[in-house]
Image (tube, rainbow, N blue to C red):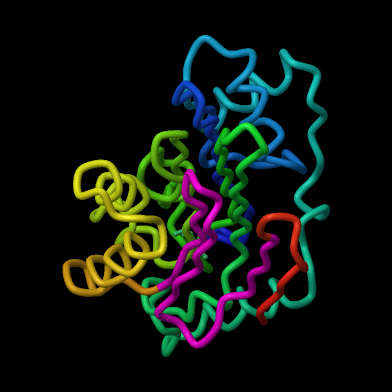
Amino acid sequence: VLNEAGRVEMDAAIMDGRGLEAGAVAALSNIANPIRLARLVLTDARHLMYVADGALRFAERHGVARVTDDYFMTAERLLEFEKAQKPDFEAPAHNAPDKHGTIGAVARDLAGNLAAATSTGGTTAKALGRVGDSPIIGAGVWADDATCAVSCTGTGEAFMRTVLAKTMADHMELLGLDGPTAADAGLDYLVRRAQGRGGFILVDHDGRCSARFTTRRMIHGWIERGGETQCRL
Ligand code: ASP
């Protein structure tokens, strides 16, 4: 996904539900795998979130190599960017979220530990320096062994305004809901309070997987209790 300047700026965060430890990077350029850098922040940094030049400096100090912008360019993204230059381009906030490039993962291990990760290039033609929900703990990503792990995708501003991932965890903790019921309540809250568009994946402390979205589709897959791998396009 290219920003208004035709450059790639990415956001990513990862969270370990055992002790609410997290690492995040935002407005980051020229790093091939932002989620790996976020993990390094989680394990090795003094702080929780690094942005822009500071994130690059952290990467350099930890021996993470830079790549040039060409590394990220694909014909599809360049075309999208060209379309975004036209005066009738639909504002990014109303773009179909199934056209965005966010990747999310949530997991529960055998011991019941939860973890979540979200990584994104953001929304097409976003302003320089715009940061979405993906690296914001509690908005686009959340993991707490006591409740659930969540990763979101969609128009980030709505997910930030509703602090959606943490809101669903709170529904579980404070109202005693299970994951799938909290997921229903979360989607309802997103739409009702912020006219939000997008979706999320959630795994609860018992290992129940949920995926909810307002969009036509959201590519996702899951495996539950050693059963079959499921995939939905
Ligand atoms: N949530 C991301 C953002 O707003 C975009 C997406 O999920 O497609 O940056």
Image quadrant for the N terminus? Answer: bottom right
Q: Nearer the viewer, residue 63 or 47?
A: 47
Observer able to see residue 123: yes
Identified at 43% across, 71% down, the residue is 198
Q: Is residue 55 above or below residue 165?
A: above
Observer able to see residue 4: no
Judged by its main secondary structure, the magenta piece is: strand
Identified at 21% across, 67% down, the residue is 194
Q: Residue furthest left?
A: 193
Q: Is residue 187 left or right of residue 89?
A: left
Looking at the rendered structure, the number of numbered marks drawn on it comes to 0
The quadrant where residue 60 appears: top right
Identified at 30% across, 48% down, the residue is 172
* Residue 59 x/y as whole percent: 69, 23
Q: Is residue 206 left or right of residue 174?
A: right
Q: Which residues are magenta?
A: 198-223
Q: Is residue 198 above or below residue 143?
A: below
* Residue 6 x/y as whole percent: 61, 61
Q: Is residue 162 left or right of residue 143?
A: left
Q: Is residue 49 above or below residue 222?
A: above
Image quadrant for the C terminus? Answer: bottom right
* Residue 128 x/y as whole percent: 47, 51
Q: Is residue 37 left or right of residue 45?
A: right
Identified at 25% across, 72% down, the residue is 188
* Residue 199 on the magenta span: yes
* Residue 92 on the magenta span: no
* Residue 140 x/y as whole percent: 43, 50
